[in-house]
Image (cartoon, grey):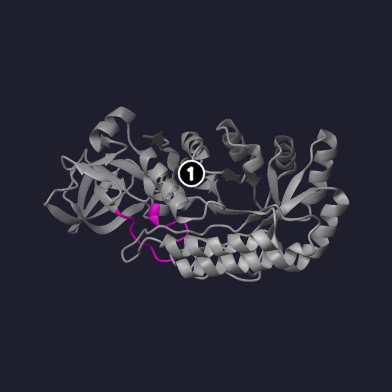
């Protein structure tokens, strides 16, 4: 993709030619994340969005400790979805005051850990409230809570809807009066709301609409809240282009919309901080997956490039991570990017299943055994979101360069 340079016919990642980087890593397959691109994306967001808005990194998109450590210095806070992620965020030096913990199935032990760490818990069930209260009493530490709200609207154009209608995420708007009463009765430290309508949206106008609706809903709910709102997470949903015809998200209207909401919040919710929670948008385009060709086969006229990595490392590129109709991620032969010798070929992994398809009949440089296939847009939901134990093949390596 255009964010990566090409030198001597080879892709350049983190300032290194791909063949040199592969030698440095020592084996394939591997993921490589370009720290320069991560810094650039954070700077672009800072420039486009109002300074009053806090940027949080949703580390489920890429929980590699080195990436989280870098991101902790680039953003205002970290959003975690398990006690395991919480440990990584704390180890990376993230400020506990700016860590929030979401998830529909938090175990009692995880809730206790969150209280002990003094992080903000996004409550998603009435069941969580007495557990948090007991941990607070036992530890002598205030249990900080926000309510994750399941809104009464959906984010249009979202690749994955996480709010509106029946959902396992958050608490339905209709139930909030009871939740507020229980929070007050349990003596929990209420701080605000978390609303996350959906993800992977490339339409700025629908993101702006969701932010506006989320703000209006939070404003209405604040009237019955047990304490003034200090924290208002408006979610994220910012998408990146994966497939032909998709265009990058236009940040300008989103920045203008958030500026207007910040101005309103100063009057409507004095003391409240607005938060945008982004994962894929921060890291997705900064990563590549690199796998080596171990065989070249022709079956009834169709070329198959068989590689040493597949859906076990990169489930989403195989089309088995939420795609309804399979589409190819951007793919190239990374050590022959400029080659004029081209052919239509399919890239498949080493697994004994027809689902292990990384590129289906794509126009690629002519490749041979030993060449390096690169899958772009691989910085989010890659290694940690894939079944790496499937069929017993070796795990992949991850590097930050």
Tell which of 372 and 161 is nearer to you.
Answer: 161
Along the viewing direction, whichever of 129 and 290 lies nearer the viewer: 129
Q: Which residues are magenta?
A: 317-330
Q: Quadrant of residue 38?
A: top left
Residue sitting at x 81%, y 48%: 188
Residue under label 1, please give it: 62
Q: Is residue 300 above or below residue 395?
A: below
Q: Quadrant of the C terminus?
A: top left
Residue 319 in the magenta stretch? The answer is yes
Label 1 packing within 10 angstroms: few (<14), some (14-19), many (20+): many
Is residue 287 placed above or below 17 in the rendered structure?
A: below
Residue 373 location, quadrant: top left
Residue in the image at 52% along x and 67% along y: 208
Q: Residue 87 in the image: x percent, y percent?
A: 61, 34
Image coords of residue 366 (percent x, y)? 16, 49
As drawn, is 130 to the left or to the right of 261?
right
Between 295 and 22, the residue placed more toward the observer is: 22
- The overriding secondary structure of the stretch rendered in magenta is loop
57 relative to 293 in the view: left or right: right
Q: Residue furthest right?
A: 185
Q: Please indicate, yes or no, whether residue 100 appears anywhere in the rendered image.
A: yes
Q: Residue furthest left?
A: 340
């Amino acid at each position: 993709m255009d964010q990566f340079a090409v030198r001597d016919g080879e892709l350049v990642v983190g300032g290194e030619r791909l063949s040199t980087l592969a030698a440095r890593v020592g084996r394939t397959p591997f993921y490589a994340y370009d720290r320069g691109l991560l810094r650039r994306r954070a700077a672009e967001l800072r420039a486009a969005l109002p300074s009053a808005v806090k940027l949080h990194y949703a580390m489920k998109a890429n929980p590699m400790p080195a990436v989280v450590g870098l991101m902790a210095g680039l953003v205002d806070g970290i959003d975690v979805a398990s006690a395991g992620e919480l440990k990584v965020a704390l180890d990376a030096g993230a400020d506990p005051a700016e860590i929030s913990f979401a998830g529909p199935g938090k175990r009692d032990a995880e809730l206790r850990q969150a209280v002990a760490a003094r992080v903000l818990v996004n409550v998603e069930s009435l069941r969580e409230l007495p557990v948090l209260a007991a941990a607070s009493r036992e530890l002598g530490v205030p249990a900080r809570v926000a309510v994750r709200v399941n809104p009464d609207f959906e984010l249009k154009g979202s690749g994955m809807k996480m709010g509106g209608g029946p959902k396992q995420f958050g608490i339905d708007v209709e139930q909030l009066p009871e939740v507020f009463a229980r929070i007050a009765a349990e003596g929990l430290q209420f701080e605000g709301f978390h609303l996350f309508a959906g993800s992977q949206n490339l339409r700025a106008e629908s993101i702006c609409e969701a932010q506006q609706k989320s703000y209006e809903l939070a404003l209405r709910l604040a009237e019955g809240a047990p304490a003034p709102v200090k924290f208002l997470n408006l979610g994220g949903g910012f998408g990146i282009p994966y497939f032909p015809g998709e265009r990058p998200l236009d940040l300008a209207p989103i920045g203008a919309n958030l500026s207007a909401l910040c101005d309103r919040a100063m009057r409507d919710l004095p003391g409240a901080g607005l938060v945008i929670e982004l994962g894929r948008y921060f890291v997705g385009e900064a990563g590549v997956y690199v796998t080596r060709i171990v065989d070249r086969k022709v079956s009834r006229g169709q070329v198959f490039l068989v590689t040493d990595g597949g859906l076990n490392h990169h489930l989403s590129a195989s089309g088995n991570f939420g795609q309804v109709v399979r589409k190819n991620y951007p793919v190239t032969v990374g050590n022959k990017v400029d080659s004029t010798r081209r052919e239509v070929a399919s890239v498949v992994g080493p697994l004994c299943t027809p689902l292990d398809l990384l590129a289906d009949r794509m126009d690629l440089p002519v490749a041979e055994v030993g060449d390096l296939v690169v899958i772009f847009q691989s910085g989010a939901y890659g290694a940690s979101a894939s079944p790496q134990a499937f069929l017993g093949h070796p795990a992949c390596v991850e590097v930050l360069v």
